[in-house]
Amino acid sequence: MQKTSQTYGVHTVTVYQTGTLVIGSGCGGLAAADYLFDFGQQDILIITEGVNMGTSRNAGSDKQTFYKLSLAADELDSVGEMAQTLFSCGGINGDTALAEASCSARCFMKLVQYGVPFPTDRYGAYIGYKTDHDPRRRATSAGPYTSKYMTECLERSVRAKGIPILESMCAVRLLVYGGRCYGVLAVDGAQSGGTNKGLTIFLANHTILATGGPASAYESSVYPESQTGMTGMAVEAGASMQNLMDWQYGLASIKFRWNVSGTYQQALPRYISVSPDGQEREFLTEYYSTPQEVLDRVFLKGYQWPFDVRKLDGSSMIDILVYQETQKGNRVYMDFTQDPVGLPDGFSMLSRECRDYLDRSGGICPYPVERLTRMNAPAVQLYLDHSIDLRREPLEIRVCAQHCCGGIAVDANWQTDIPHLYAVGEAAGTFGAYRPGGMALASTQTGALRAAEHISHCTPAPMGVQALAHDREAGQFIQSLLALSKKPSQPMAENSMQKLQSEFTRYAGHLRDTNKMRQMLSERTAGLSRFFHDRNACIPSDLSNLLHYRDIMFTQGAALSAMLLSAQHMGSRGSGLVVDPAYPNRYLPENIGFQDKYIRTSYKNGQFRSTVETVRPLPDCDSWFETTWKEFRERQKLPSH
């Protein structure tokens, strides 16, 4: 890594030069840097807003899941079967599905060796369980903090290898010249009070985006508040997006952001609604014929936590009913202190699946909190660690955005359509509409491995300094940021960002209003065209917030474009339930004929454009050893670009 400077008028901006730049310090970013080092790369730099920020460090669920090839003694599985499962999720490319399946066990065992405590039976087999959209028991977990353990283990390895990590760096603009990525512009929060407003340039032969999903798009969100995402940065740079209409939404607590999936539901809590004047009622019983039917739906919600348009007659109706209560101005809670209506009549009235699960898990006892403690004591302790005692107080919940199944389009090496720009983890759009639960964690590792392996075989000629000197667009952008402080003070309204997020939650979440979304898309497009004429960073600390606000506009604009085209061709899909414009109380059905399609979105000439594309098929692989070995040896000497 080299450090120089670049002059813009009277301002001097710090410039770093490195071989490979990794943006983000979650599971994906740390794994990418770690693999790069193992593959012989030495010139690596990680930049991050903070190693303790982001989803990997701060998010989870009752059993945060890692999805991999089954290694259990009593479960038959194969790479081909797992690839087919992923490919059938809808809108996923076959080559990335095969790569995910092929590399999952390899990446899993590395985490085991690094110290992530995935459980085994007494003979050493890595037992598994079924997760959503999973036909086999491929899922495993180290508990609520699985991803946190992963980042801690990976960080220890990265630091032991001497890979530098620069904190307080917020990436705001990708640097692209001649059709190739040559680095990124960032704001150094530690230097934002200086005359150059903390602007810092990073030049790199390769850049890996590991910034996570678009965490700030929604107001009702289970993404940790410390994560910003910055998907819009790739949109603005001209990278193609894939399936930005595919998200996962589900019930989550809001005082402390956490998914209330798994045993939180299987413990059978009460669902209560509290009106503004304090009136409380168990509202689910108003929509079902018997209390036992309610309890069976709640139990299934544990397995089927994400809202799913195909389960409206089952567990996903609970999400709709919770949302309706909040739209009335009521607050909704899961109450673990008392048994719900119907349970005092006895467990024998429950479905056999529910009753057997509780019996085998030691959950046949009074009160939800006691059942939860017996079945999953860490789930109770987790909330206690965040000053919420489930034995004494109800848990306020909402339907929240949890995960973006779309993202930046990548090839089988996780390279975007901008050469030398890679995207790994949730930043990449490798997930299908119905991805298995836990695939997000696994993809942080498999995508990182694929990107690092590909980079290690490429030796491009450095072009950073020359590109920066000729990149007029980047120079004009930097000059415009430096000039902001010279304008009259016009601080961004405090509620501007919240307004964007609130609108997106209400009209473009799990329930989608196409008329409102068209209006929002028009507003986002127009707002971006005049952004720097309307806004001003009045104090140094406002610059990052201002550019974050702008990034949300790019992200939402691209997502709205994809959602509108998807509604037109695919109808309701995955977690997006499209309201029929002609009949507000009716929903558009899913068009199953489009399961092999995805939506590609790009931003050019100030406009968002989406098209329906056909996925790349599953590769027909040659499994003959000698030919594979020959191809492997040749691949070690990839030509430079």
Image (tube, rainbow, N blue to C red):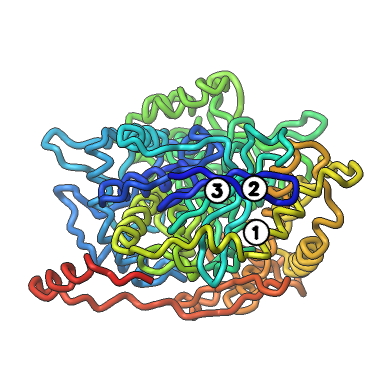
Structural distance between the alpha carbons of marks 2 and 3: 11 Å
Q: Nearer the viewer, mark 2 or mark 3?
A: 2
The image quarter containing residue 340 is top right
- x and y percent of residue 549 in the render? 72, 49
Q: Earlier in the sequence, mark 2 or mark 3?
A: 2
Q: Label 1: which residue? A: 555
Are the residues tagged 2 and 3 within 8 Å (C-beta)?
Answer: no
Apparent side of residue 419 relative to residue 635 in the rendered image (left or right): right
Q: Residue at x 56, y 79 (%)?
A: 612
How busy is the neighbourhood of tag 1: few (under 14 within 10 Å), some, or many (20 plus)? many
Amino acid under disc 3: Gln
Above or below: residue 172 compared with residue 582: above
Q: Is residue 243 visible to the viewer in this orientation of the structure?
A: yes
Structural distance between the alpha carbons of marks 1 and 3: 16 Å
Residue 402 marker: 3
The image quarter containing residue 280 is top right
Apparent side of residue 419 relative to residue 448 in the rendered image (left or right): right
- x and y percent of residue 151 in the render? 39, 37
Residue 216 marker: 2
Are the residues tagged 1 and 3 within 8 Å (C-beta)?
Answer: no
Q: Earlier in the sequence, mark 1 or mark 3?
A: 3
- x and y percent of residue 509 in the render? 65, 56
Secondary-structure class at tag 1: helix
- x and y percent of residue 343 in the render? 50, 34
Q: Earlier in the sequence, mark 1 or mark 2?
A: 2
Secondary-structure class at tag 3: strand
Return the residue nearer the eye: 510 or 107. 107
**Image quadrant for the C terminus?**
bottom left
Are the residues tagged 1 and 2 within 8 Å (C-beta)?
Answer: yes
Return the residue nearer the eye: 296 or 636. 636
